[in-house]
Image: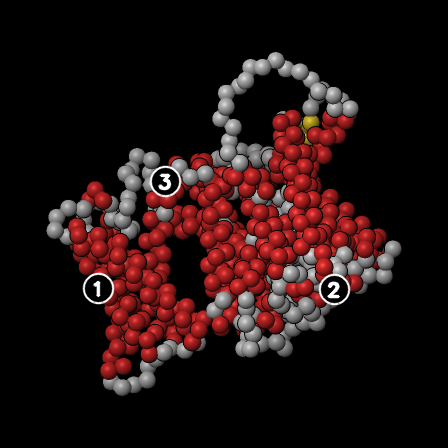
């Protein structure tokens, strides 16, 4: 992927520098890298998708195309390794490709001999092994090629928007495969696009019931889209480059730092590794706990699938469920282990990677101090403190308010007790989207409370959406400071927060309000003839914009125009309204006017 600042830009596959090519093999090497290898990867991808999404079995053309791609791939990789420049690290970089090529060659040869002997050896697993071997090699080469794109002077916002849009398009095409839905069902293009957007933007709104409409293949596609959308395709690409020892260039670090909101360029690689490893670790532990908390009478494979799906969906704050009635289904109804585990995953995933990393460093420093070891004293950053305090206030305060509005002033439904139900919906309303009771049965005051929690959302740098906790906390703090007419500025945890930060926070809140107001009026106009109340429309709109996924059983009833409007709001909410606006609005490059200043009355 990335390169050292002093190294030349490479244009070949792993290990191939343009400057190192010379002699009669140059043309052959160029053809292998630029034509043959990508073509073989495309053929393998086509065979794999046809097997998974269309046929479900090895047909004649899949069999022979897979064998041909495998054998040619093995020969091509072997010749490329032999013809590579022995000087430098060129051949070392191709060793891994050659190991895969040797394994693919022997499997392909075995399949070919059994075919010639007349034996029925169309084993699906071995064909998938060949297809994935060729495809993984191609993806590794493509990751190396990304230097071409990230080296260009592209606005980080354009890169972020383009990466999410691309994966949404890919997800839409995958969900249109016939085997992604149950027999007898048909997924329209709009429903596929809506589901793909909802999964990639980790929202959870569904126009079709995930459990009763999509097959296991479709659910796995949704799961992969959630994971990629939660981490970000660029984050995964950069991480793969670090794993493949390609390194990150200065431009890569700047670009990634803007995307994950970390300006510590020297720690970008460590932060990136921490994000991916911590995500996998939390999802793995969560899946294990969920697996242990399910009824043992259910088959272990089904338990494992439900557990993994909900662990990923919860940590990524997606809200998708493989149960027909979400977490209100009888399979996990009144299951305290499931509800508590899902709540913890939601909160941890919504805190943000920077907060979690800062907390881990703080605990490590405290542990070393406890053991009597020397080490630097780690102080939690002001950002971490504000996120933790705001999150705690919203979780506990929201639960208390829901207890009052839903169970003291309204005879609302419960699942596992009133306290657990209140806490669960206080947590899930902040961009997770799971529900343990029917949302149509909750009280009107609780609906308003949930909308407030949805608008606030989670914290920057995490998988949550909304305006963000820090924006609300800093914005309200700045407003309070202005109302008091104080001159000491805004102070929090013995640190002064610049007034510019407070003004930006209030500006973001105002921008979000304007966006929601304009979209709500458009939403009303689109759904004017459907007899839907304004409260339900506003709830659905906020849920989409804040990437929450809660719905008062309205999403499937919307018109095509309403669904399209929600797709736009999910996309903008996941990218970030400020990022979208800053990308679309050209910067002001004019010089300072130098005109005289004059005050304007505001009150």
Q: Which one is nearer the viewer's eye here, 555 or 221?
A: 555
Where does residue 562 sit, x and y in percent of width and height? 64, 56
Where does residue 229 sit, x and y in percent of width and height? 52, 53
Q: Residue at x 72, y 34 (%)?
A: 476
Q: Residue at x 33, y 62 (%)?
A: 41
In this rendering, the answer to whether 528 lies above or below 481 is: below
Lateral position of residue 509 relative to residue 267, left or right: right
* Residue farthest top in this picture: 596
Where does residue 469 sit, x and y in percent of width and height? 66, 42
> In 3D space, how far apart are the residues under numbered discs 2 and 1 (Cα atoms)?
59 Å
Q: How many numbered dots are placed on residues in this image?
A: 3
* Residue farthest left in this picture: 24
Q: Residue at x 24, y 45 (%)?
A: 17
According to the image, label 2 marks what residue?
A: 438
> In 3D space, how far apart are the residues under numbered discs 3 and 2 (Cα atoms)?
50 Å
Quick one: label 3 or label 2, which is nearer the N terminus? 3
In this rendering, the answer to whether 468 lies above or below 178 is: above
According to the image, label 3 marks what residue?
A: 151
The reply to whether residue 311 is visible in this rendering is no
Q: Which one is nearer the viewer's eye here, 460 or 151?
A: 151
Lateral position of residue 55 relative to residue 402, left or right: left
Lateral position of residue 498 relative to residue 392, left or right: left
């Amino acid at each position: 992927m990335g390169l050292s600042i002093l190294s030349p830009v490479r244009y070949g596959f792993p290990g191939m520098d343009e400057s190192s090519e010379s002699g009669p093999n140059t043309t052959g090497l160029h053809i292998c890298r630029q034509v043959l290898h990508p073509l073989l990867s495309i053929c393998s991808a086509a065979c794999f998708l046809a097997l998974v999404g269309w046929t479900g079995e090895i047909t004649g053309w899949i069999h022979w195309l897979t064998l041909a791609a495998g054998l040619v791939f093995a020969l091509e990789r072997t010749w490329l390794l032999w013809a590579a420049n022995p000087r430098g690290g060129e051949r070392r970089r191709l060793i891994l490709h050659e190991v895969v090529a040797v394994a693919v060659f022997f499997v392909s040869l075995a399949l070919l001999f059994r075919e010639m002997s007349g034996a029925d050896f169309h084993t699906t697993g071995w064909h998938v092994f060949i297809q994935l071997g060729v495809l993984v090699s191609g993806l590794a080469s493509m990751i190396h090629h990304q230097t071409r794109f990230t080296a260009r002077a592209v606005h980080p916002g354009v890169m972020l928007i383009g990466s999410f849009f691309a994966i949404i398009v890919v997800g839409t095409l995958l969900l249109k495969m016939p085997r992604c839905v149950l027999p007898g069902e048909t997924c329209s293009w709009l429903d596929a696009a809506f589901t793909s957007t909802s999964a990639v933007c980790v929202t959870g709104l569904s126009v079709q019931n995930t459990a009763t409409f999509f097959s296991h293949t479709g659910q796995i596609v949704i799961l992969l889209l959630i994971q990629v959308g939660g981490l970000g395709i660029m984050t995964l690409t950069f991480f793969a480059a670090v794993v493949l020892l390609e390194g990150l260039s200065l431009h890569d670090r700047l670009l990634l730092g803007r995307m994950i909101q970390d300006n510590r360029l020297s720690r970008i690689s460590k932060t990136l590794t921490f994000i991916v490893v911590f995500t996998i670790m939390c999802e793995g532990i969560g899946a294990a706990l969920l697996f242990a908390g399910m009824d043992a009478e259910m088959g272990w494979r089904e338990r494992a699938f439900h557990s993994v799906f909900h662990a990923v969906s919860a940590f990524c704050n997606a809200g998708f469920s493989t149960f027909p009635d979400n977490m209100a289904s009888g399979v996990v109804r009144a299951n305290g282990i499931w509800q508590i585990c899902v709540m913890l995953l939601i909160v941890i995933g919504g805190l943000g990677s920077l907060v979690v990393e800062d907390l881990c460093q703080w605990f490590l420093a405290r542990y070393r101090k406890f053991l009597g070891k020397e080490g630097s004293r780690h102080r939690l950053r002001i950002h971490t403190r504000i996120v933790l305090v705001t999150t705690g206030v919203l979780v506990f305060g929201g639960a208390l308010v829901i207890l009052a509005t839903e169970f003291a002033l309204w005879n609302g439904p419960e699942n596992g007790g009133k306290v657990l139900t209140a806490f669960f919906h206080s947590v899930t309303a902040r961009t997770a989207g799971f529900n343990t009771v029917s949302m149509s049965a909750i009280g009107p005051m609780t609906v308003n409370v949930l909308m407030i929690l949805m608008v606030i959302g989670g914290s920057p740098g995490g998988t949550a959406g909304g305006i963000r906790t820090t924006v609300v906390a800093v914005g309200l703090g700045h407003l309070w400071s202005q109302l008091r007419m104080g001159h000491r500025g805004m102070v929090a945890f013995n640190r002064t927060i610049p007034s510019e930060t407070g003004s930006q926070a209030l500006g973001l809140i105002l921008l979000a309000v304007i966006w929601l107001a304009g979209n709500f009026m458009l939403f009303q106009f689109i759904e004017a003839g459907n007899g839907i109340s304004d409260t339900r429309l506003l709830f659905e709109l906020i849920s989409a914009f804040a990437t929450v996924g809660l719905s008062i059983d309205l999403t499937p009833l919307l018109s095509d125009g309403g669904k399209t409007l929600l797709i736009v709001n999910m996309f903008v909410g996941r990218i970030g309204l400020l990022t979208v606006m800053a990308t679309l609005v050209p910067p002001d490059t004019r010089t300072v006017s130098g005109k005289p200043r004059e005050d304007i009355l505001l009150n």
